[in-house]
Image (cartoon, rainbow, N blue to C red):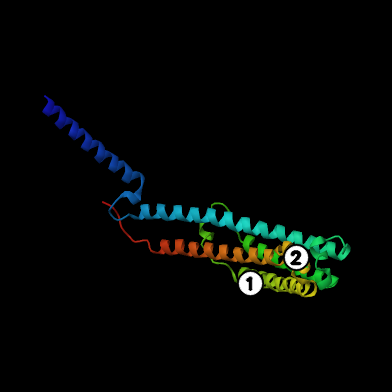
Amino acid sequence: DELKFETHNSRMKQRVVHTTKELTQQQDPLASNGPLDEDEQEEIVQELELEQLRQTRLWRGCFGVGAMLMAVFFAWASWTQWAHPWSLRMTGELRAATHGNDVVAVLGVQAVALGAVSIALLRKLPKRGERERMCMPYSLSQKLLLGAGILGCAACASYWLSAHARMVQQFGSELGARWELIWVPLGPLAYSGVSLWAASVLARSGAAVAELRSFKYNHKKV
C-alpha cells in the first residue's frame, strides 16, 4: 500500500508540474522554447511600443516643462534687470565686471535658448495610445531648436565665466570669486545638455523598437 501511495503521489506531482508549465507558456509567450507565432510576436512588440510611449511622454514632458520654467525665470530676470537694475543680487555681485545692457541681453538670450529646448522637446509629443508616433525620429526643426538652444546657453555661459574671471583678476580669489553664482552660467548649459542626452537616448530606444517590428518573422504554430 505504501508503494502504491508513493507511486500515485509521484504521478500527481508530475502532472502538477506539467500543468504549471503549460499554463506559464500560455500566459507568457517568452516562456516557450519554440518559435513565436505572429500573434505572440505582435503582442510582445506592442508591449514594448507602449512602454516606449510611456517613457517618451514622461521624460520629454519632464525635461520640456523644466526648460520652460527656467526660460520663464531668466526672462523675468532679464526684465527685472532692465526695469530695476539694482534689485537683482545675481547680477549685482558681478556689476564691476559687466554692463547693464549686456546683462539684460545675455539673460534674454538664456531665456530664448531654454525656450527653444523646451519647444523642441514638447513639440509633436505623442499622445496616449499613439504607438505609431513614438518611434518617429525628431524632425529637422526639432534638431535645429535643440542645437540652437545649447549653443545659446554655451555662449551665455562663456560671458558669465569671463565676468567671473575678471572679478577674480581685479579683486583676487577671496573677494572676487562668486562661486555661489556658478549656477547662472552652468545651470542652463548643463540642463540643455542633459535634455539633449535624454532626447537622444529616447530616439535610439524608439528606433530599436521600430527595428524589432521589422524583424518579425512569419510562423504559425500548429
Instruction: Identify which amino acid the numbered label 1 is placed on.
Output: Gly
Residue 107, given in percent of the width and then of the height, sits at 77, 67
Q: Most extreme residue toward the top, as rendered?
A: 1
Specify the label residue 112 is tagged with.
none
Q: At x 40% / y 55%, what residue is drawn?
A: 42
Q: At x 41% / y 52%, what residue is drawn?
A: 43
Residue 195, given in percent of the width and then of the height, sits at 61, 63
Residue in the foreground of this view, choosing between 126 and 30: 30
Q: How many marks?
A: 2
Query: Hey, which quadrant is residue 5 in on the image?
Result: top left
Q: At x 22% / y 35%, what residue is drawn?
A: 13
The relative height of residue 163 versus residue 9 in the rendered view (above or below) is below
Residue in the foreground of this view, choosing between 119 and 39: 119
Please tell me which of labels 2 and 1 falls first in the chain: 1
Q: Is residue 184 left or right of residue 78?
A: left
**Which residue carries the number 2 mark?**
178
Specify the label residue 147 is tagged with.
1
- Classify the position of the N terminus by image quarter: top left
Q: At x 36% / y 52%, what residue is drawn?
A: 40
Query: Hey, which quadrant is residue 59 in on the image?
Result: bottom right
Q: Is residue 130 visible?
A: no
Query: Hey, which quadrant is residue 38 in on the image?
Result: bottom left
Q: Residues within 10 Å of mark 1 (few under 14, many from 20)?
A: some
Residue 76, given in percent of the width and then of the height, sits at 80, 60
Residue 123, given in percent of the width and then of the height, sits at 64, 62
Q: Is residue 21 visible?
A: yes
The relative height of residue 111 versus residue 41 in the rendered view (above or below) is below
Instruction: Identify which amino acid the numbered label 2 is placed on.
Output: Arg
